[in-house]
Each structure stands twice: as structure tokens, then as C-alpha cells.
């Protein structure tokens, strides 16, 4: 089982790093796209390292990653992007790095669009599943990037005890 787990971490890490590098190469100066690429690239390196070092994060670590990922995804709804464009079109996206909860409208005049933009809460919201998936990936990788190194540093700072519930352990030492 250890070889399979190592392969999964390695493949997930390489895939994440590749997506991150692709995002960085195509970001064209968009800050949120650059942040997305950096987080996926760095978290991919952490996951690949876990595979190469044959380290196994325990369920407590993955629970912390899941909680932080969901918290980040929900907190990202506080980020609002609004655009008026395209001969009187209005778009509003909630979420970070991509607005995965969208609303929008079009009108015949700029005055009508400004009226719509003044009260965007009246517009119906639409869930964009692709952007939600990308945002969930981003926040999960951000959580991996925060939790795994912190656990490894904390783990290295305390002595091992035989009855200790290991959070991250090497498969070579596992019984």
C-alpha cells in the first residue's frame, strides 16, 4: 500500500505543480491568476515531496486541510468583482480566485445599468460549477500549503513517544 500512496502523492503533486506553472505562464499580469498559479505550484511541490519522502499525513492532518479549504471557499464569497461593459452589460462575481457565484444583466442604456449595479442583490445568483471546482482546488491546495509544513515543523520540534498518535509518519518507520 505504501508504494501506491507514494505514487498518488507524487502524481497529484506533479499534476498540481504543472497546472500551477501553466497558470503562471498564462497569467498575463492578472493578480488572482498569478496567486492561483503560485499556490498550486508550491502545494504541488509539497505533495510531490510527501510522495518522494514516503511521508503519510494522518487523518487529523487531512481533516485540518478539509476544514481550512471549506473555510477559505466560504470566506472567498466576501470578494466581489463587478464589471460594467459591452454596451451596457453588468456582471458581478463572488468568490476568489474566480467568481463562482455569478449574477448579471444587460440593458438598453447606461443609466439602466447603473441602476442595476446600485442594487445587485436583486439579481438572481447562478452557480458556475467549473469555477467552483477551480476555487475548491485552490483553497484545498492553500490549506495543504499551510498545514503540511506546519505539522512537519511541529512534529520535528517534539520528541517521539511510543504511544504518540502520529500525525505524519514515514512508511519506513510505520509498523
Image (cartoon, rainbow, N blue to C red):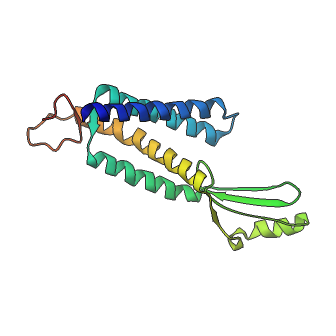
Query: 160 or 49: which is nearer to us?
Result: 49
- Decide if residue 44 is on the left or right side of residue 51: right
Residue depicted at x 45% and y 33%: 44
Residue depicted at x 42% and y 32%: 11
Residue depicted at x 62% and y 50%: 98
Quadrant in the rendering for residue 124: bottom right
Q: Position of residue 100 (x, y in %)?
A: 61, 56
Q: Quadrant of the N terminus?
A: top left
Q: In the image, is residue 59 above or below residue 162?
A: below
Q: In the image, is residue 82 above or below residue 51?
A: below
Q: Position of residue 85 (x, y in %)?
A: 83, 54
- Residue furthest left as drawn: 162
Q: Quadrant of the C terminus?
A: top left
Q: In the image, is residue 4 above or below residue 96?
A: above
Q: Position of residue 112 (x, y in %)?
A: 86, 69
- Residue furthest bottom as drawn: 122
The reply to whether residue 153 is visible in this rendering is no
The reply to whether residue 149 is visible in this rendering is yes
- Decide if residue 79 is on the left or right side of residue 108: left
- Decide if residue 37 is on the left or right side of residue 87: left
Quadrant in the rendering for residue 53: top left
- Decide if residue 28 is on the left or right side of residue 158: right
**Number of callouts:** 0
- Residue furthest right as drawn: 109
Residue depicted at x 42% and y 45%: 143
Amino acid at each position: 500500500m505504501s508504494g501506491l500512496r507514494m505514487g498518488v502523492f507524487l502524481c497529484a503533486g506533479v499534476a498540481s505543480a504543472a497546472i500551477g506553472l501553466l497558470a503562471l505562464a498564462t497569467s498575463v499580469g492578472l493578480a488572482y491568476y498569478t496567486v492561483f498559479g503560485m499556490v498550486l505550484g508550491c502545494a504541488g511541490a509539497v505533495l510531490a515531496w510527501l510522495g518522494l519522502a514516503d511521508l503519510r499525513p494522518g487523518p487529523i492532518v487531512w481533516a485540518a486541510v478539509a476544514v481550512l479549504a471549506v473555510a477559505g471557499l466560504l470566506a472567498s464569497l466576501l470578494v466581489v468583482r463587478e464589471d460594467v461593459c459591452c454596451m451596457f452589460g453588468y456582471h458581478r462575481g463572488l468568490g476568489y480566485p474566480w467568481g463562482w457565484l455569478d449574477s448579471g444583466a444587460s440593458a438598453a442604456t447606461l443609466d439602466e445599468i447603473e441602476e442595476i449595479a446600485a442594487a445587485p442583490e436583486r439579481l438572481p445568483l447562478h452557480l458556475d460549477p467549473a469555477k467552483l471546482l477551480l476555487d475548491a482546488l485552490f483553497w484545498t491546495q492553500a490549506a495543504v500549503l499551510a498545514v503540511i509544513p506546519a505539522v512537519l515543523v511541529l512534529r520535528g520540534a517534539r520528541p517521539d513517544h511510543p504511544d504518540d498518535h502520529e500525525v505524519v509518519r514515514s512508511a519506513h518507520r510505520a509498523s
